[in-house]
Amino acid sequence: MNIEDIKTVGVAGTGSMGVGIMQVAAQAGFQVRAVDVSQAAWDRALKTITKSLERLLAKEKITEEELKATLSRISFSTDLESLKDVPFIFEAVFENLQVKKDLYEKLDAIAREDVVYASNTSSLSITEMAALVKHPGQFIGMHFFNPVPMMKLVEVIPALQTEKATTSLALEIAKKIGKTSITCKDTPGFVLNRLLVPYMLDAVRLLEQGVASRDDIDTAMKLGAGMPMGPFELMDFTGVEISLYVGDIFFEATKEPRFAPPGLLRNMVKAGYLGRKTGKGFYEYPAK
Ligand SMILES: NC(=O)c1ccc[n+]([C@@H]2O[C@H](COP(=O)([O-])OP(=O)(O)OC[C@H]3O[C@@H](n4cnc5c(N)ncnc54)[C@H](O)[C@@H]3O)[C@@H](O)[C@H]2O)c1
């Protein structure tokens, strides 16, 4: 299949990542068929996309016509059948192998024989997921970053079984939707999280050992390494529990001590100090 053959893409899961993938795909001119088990998730997604496009309009980055045309290219259903003639499907459902397995089983029963699946998983094995589908050669990882419309990077991760044509197609699609891609072997963390997760866990270890204060560690990385946020600001932003969850998964897969979450991080999650969304993480966020 060539990129010219792809006029419509599917997006399964309209949560934090699906919503961004829908937006950038529709802005690039693809018809987008979105599917979610939850109507409420779609209602939220539509509001998010509309607001995001309105911000671009206010900054004169898009015109009123482009805003309307983008929205008109996106349709939604809670019925997977709506993806039956779609050649390329992005998957962004819950990060749970069983949920993904069930979804691919249902998709395989209705999808085109030549369909390509691109999973947005952050921590599951692409090779293990490819082994679950009818045509493993047509399965690939495309790891976007949150928020998708802002973050330029996509990690493209071929599984052991992925055909070269599938990888080429994924790279072309990433380019068409305005992203810069890197390719990476199917290994825990791919490139970005393999470097970033131990970095954040090490910051917690420094704090735990009393080497430096939270503020000084954040200041060091912002002013000395040019990071836009310090590690504690970043963990509060992404959710403290995500660093724990991902660290545990990568440690389990690799047994490398650098992925082992420190006790302080585990206790913070037990205490419900999850970051911005709970009003307290490494920092406090008083309600406005
Ligand atoms: N959130 C991030 O920062 C981030 C970054 C990169 C990659 N990812 C990956 O993206 C994927 C989605 O993450 P998210 O943060 O958007 O999750 P989310 O919880 O925000 O959204 C998941 C959506 O999937 C829907 N869903 C669940 N089962 C479904 C099914 N069978 N069919 C259709 N829809 C279904 C849910 O209703 C929900 O709306 C995960 O694999 C995650 O690892 C997340």
Image: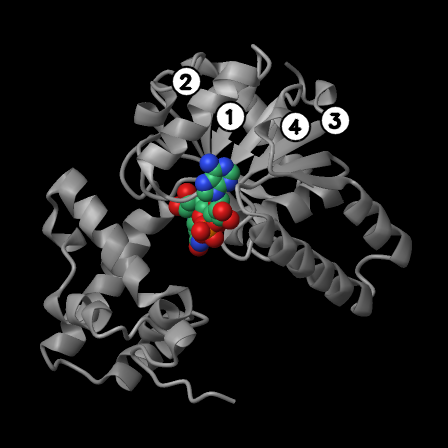
Residue hosting label 4: 82
Q: Does the residue at mark 3 contact the one at mark 4 (Cβ under 8 Å)?
A: no
Which of the 4 image quadrants contains residue 238? bottom left
Q: Does the residue at mark 1 contact the one at mark 2 (Cβ under 8 Å)?
A: yes
Q: CA distance from mark 3 to mark 4?
A: 15 Å
Q: Does the residue at mark 4 contact the one at mark 2 (Cβ under 8 Å)?
A: no
Name the residue at 69% across, 61% down.
Answer: 52
Q: CA distance from mark 1 to mark 2?
A: 9 Å
Which one is closest to the eye, mark 3 or mark 4? Answer: 4
Q: CA distance from mark 4 to mark 1?
A: 15 Å
Q: CA distance from mark 4 to mark 2?
A: 19 Å
Name the residue at 60% across, 57% down.
Answer: 150
Q: Is mark 1 within 8 Å of ligand 1?
A: no
Q: Amino acid at mark 4?
A: Ser
x and y percent of residue 121 in the render? Answer: 40, 40
29 and 195: which one is in front? Answer: 29
In terms of secondary structure, where does tag 2 sit?
Answer: loop
Q: CA distance from mark 1 to mark 3?
A: 15 Å
Q: Amino acid at mark 2?
A: Val
Give the mark, 3 or 4, whose residue is nearer the N terminus: 3
Badge 3 density bin: few <14, some 14–19, many ≥20, Cα 10 Å: few
Badge 2 density bin: few <14, some 14–19, many ≥20, Cα 10 Å: some
Give the mark, 4 or 2, whose residue is nearer the N terminus: 4
Q: Is mark 2 within 8 Å of ligand 1?
A: no
Image mark for residue 117: 1
Residue hosting label 2: 133
Residue hosting label 3: 7
Q: Residue furthest right?
A: 65
